[in-house]
Image (spheres, rainbow, N blue to C red):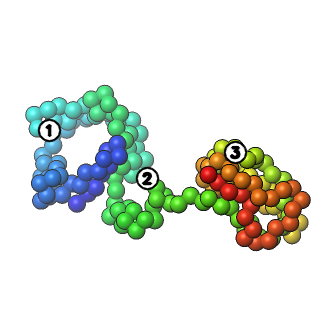
Amino acid sequence: MMTIEIDGERFVLTPDRNESLPMDSIQSLNGVENEPETYMLQYGGRSYKINIVAFDLLSRTCTMELNGQVKQIRILRDLDLMIEKMGLNTKNAKKQSLMVAPMPGLVTEIKIARGQHVDKGPPLLILEAMKMENVIAAPHDAIVKEINVQVGQAVERGFPLLEFD
């Protein structure tokens, strides 16, 4: 059994299920490589021209052109499906609505404003702890709903620094 996703739509390829393409059909596909990364495929009396645009083995994703239409393809392993079923994949990861101080410290700089859109990664504020400046970065893309601290304010670990929309 193999699961593939084409432009977000899932297909399960199995040898014995009627709702999916049977494995013996996959093995009987007639394909010819015309030029590097370009193939002609015949299936069910129709011809398909497939051009591989990009392929990333690590993420098991492929961008291909099928008869002139660009398709995004992802191969899903059993492990990927299990992680998804358990709700542990990044698609289902819950975004924080509240950012708290990871340690006690002094707020020395605030780099954002209320209502500002922030991208994942850039610094939001600087928290000084034990003579070291600690960059508090955005954990995900968000809009800053509230800033609960001001420059010069001392905070304890767990103190709510920012709220996100």
Q: Quadrant of the N terminus?
A: bottom left
Where residue 62 sits: x, y (%)? Answer: 38, 44
Q: Amino acid at mark 3?
A: Gly
Query: Who comes first in sequence, dot 3 or dot 2?
Result: 2
Question: Residue tagged by mark 2?
Answer: 59
Where residue 4 sits: x, y (%)? Answer: 30, 51
Q: Residue at x 16, y 36 (%)?
A: 42
Which of 129 and 43 lies nearest the eye of the viewer?
129
Graded by Cα atoms within 10 Å as few (under 14), some (14 to 19) or many (20 or more), the crowding at tag 2 reads: few
Question: Residue tagged by mark 1?
Answer: 43
Where residue 58 sits: x, y (%)? Answer: 44, 53
**134 with respect to 60 (left or right):** right
What's the distance in space between the residues labelled 3 and 2, CA to CA? Answer: 35 Å
Graded by Cα atoms within 10 Å as few (under 14), some (14 to 19) or many (20 or more), the crowding at tag 3 reads: some
Q: Tag 1's secondary structure? A: strand
What's the distance in space between the residues labelled 2 and 1, CA to CA? Answer: 28 Å
Give the number of the mark in front: 3 or 2.
3
Q: Amino acid at mark 2?
A: Ser
Q: Tag 3's secondary structure? A: loop
**157 with respect to 51 (left or right):** right
Q: Residue at x 82, y 67 (%)?
A: 155
Where residue 94 sits: x, y (%)? Answer: 53, 60
What's the distance in space between the residues labelled 3 and 1, CA to CA? Answer: 54 Å
Disc on res. 72: none
**49 with respect to 112 (left or right):** left
Question: Residue tagged by mark 3?
Answer: 115
